[in-house]
Image (spheres, rainbow, N blue to C red):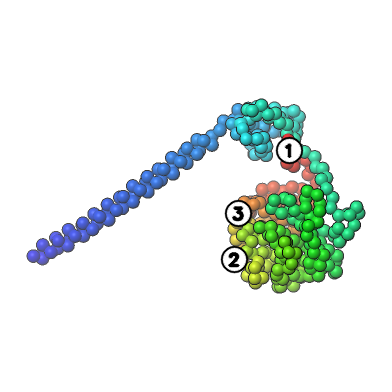
Amino acid sequence: MQQGEIAKRELEQAQVFLQVARDSHQRAEGTLNETKGRLDATTAAANAAEQPIRRVAFSPDSSRLATVGDFPSAQLWDAASGAALSSYAAGAGALVSVAYLSGSRFVTLAADGALVAWETNPSWTLAATIGGDNQPGLIADRVMSVDFSADGTQLLVAGGVPSRSGELAIFQVADGARSFHLPQAHDDVVHAARFSPDGRRIASGGADKYLRTFDIASMKPLRRFEGHTNYLLGVAWKGDGLEIASAGADATVKVWDADSADQKQSIGGFTRHVTAVEYRGATDEIVSTSGDKQVRVHNASNGGLARTIPSVPAWLHGLDVTASGEIIAAGSADGTVHVWNATNGQVLATIPAEINGGEKGAKP
């Protein structure tokens, strides 16, 4: 009887294990089919992306190589290293031929017969001047900061009269008309001002030690952020518009709630002025430059130091980070531009003050 009971229990357990195994097998088959479907889709996308190159052309000095094919853009490459230099979008269809006219000019022929000439190193021309001797009073005094709106139609100008006023103004790029003006936005010169990501607000910091926000439509102040003990030199919005980071001559970076003006983090560890600050793409990391010749990356959510970028020989001023957050560029007091990989701090380029030429853009 005991052996019979044991056998019965073992049979019941075996039936349970069998059902579990069947369920597991079914799930595995489902996962296999799903994975196979993704693999097939990826393979099809990869095959579709393999568009042939139809023509190649060396520049007269053989330093560059232009390529075109079954895609709507011409590519320019460094002939020695194979590094990509620039891309020239010619339209919506394929390009069937390319030829150099000179060292800085080439032409492309599209499948629809369109012939386009490209200048790889175009000259810069002055499009407009806002303020100055011909428009006295349009801008009160020195200009310390400028920022374009996301759509490029508006220009934010910040500055003011030292020890007297901090001015904010917005000009329409098309005709230079002033559409927003706060001559007394701050009690002293504004050193940094930025449009919010949605283009509805301005964040500005100045020599009066305050970070302030303003509503553009009504031209009314929104919040005053108190906490810095010296000039504000840099301002940055987080991509979602919920946070603002500020950099100060008090050797700190502060992170604020943009709506409540509450201070979320105060980040120290700098030995000189913090001259600029930027968020690193869509991440919580913020990048800063300092007079102590160091670029640092901090976590804005907890204030922790994520990494330091290799130091440079001179005081650092200007700073920018690519939209993807992958590359950092900074300008130093000796006229050098430094470029790093934002993820690991690797030096990508060092551009000295005396360099001339180079790719400045492209236009047909």
Identify the secondary structure beneath mark 3: loop
To which residue does mark 2 refer?
301
Q: Amino acid at mark 3?
A: Thr
Q: Nearer the viewer, mark 1 or mark 2?
A: 1
Residue 355 place in picture, x, y as percent = 78, 44
Is 50 left, or right, of 270 in this rendering? left
To which residue does mark 3 refer?
343
Q: Residue at x 66, y 64 (%)?
A: 244
Q: Nearer the viewer, mark 3 or mark 1?
A: 1
How many other residues sit within 10 Å of disc 3, few (<14), some (14-19) or many (≥20)? some
To which residue does mark 1 refer?
363
Identify the secondary structure beneath mark 1: loop
Residue 237 place in picture, x, y as percent = 67, 61
Label 3–label 2 contact, CB within 8 A: no
Q: Amino acid at mark 1?
A: Lys
Kindly report the distance in space between the C-alpha atoms of the residues bearing marks 1 and 2. Answer: 42 Å
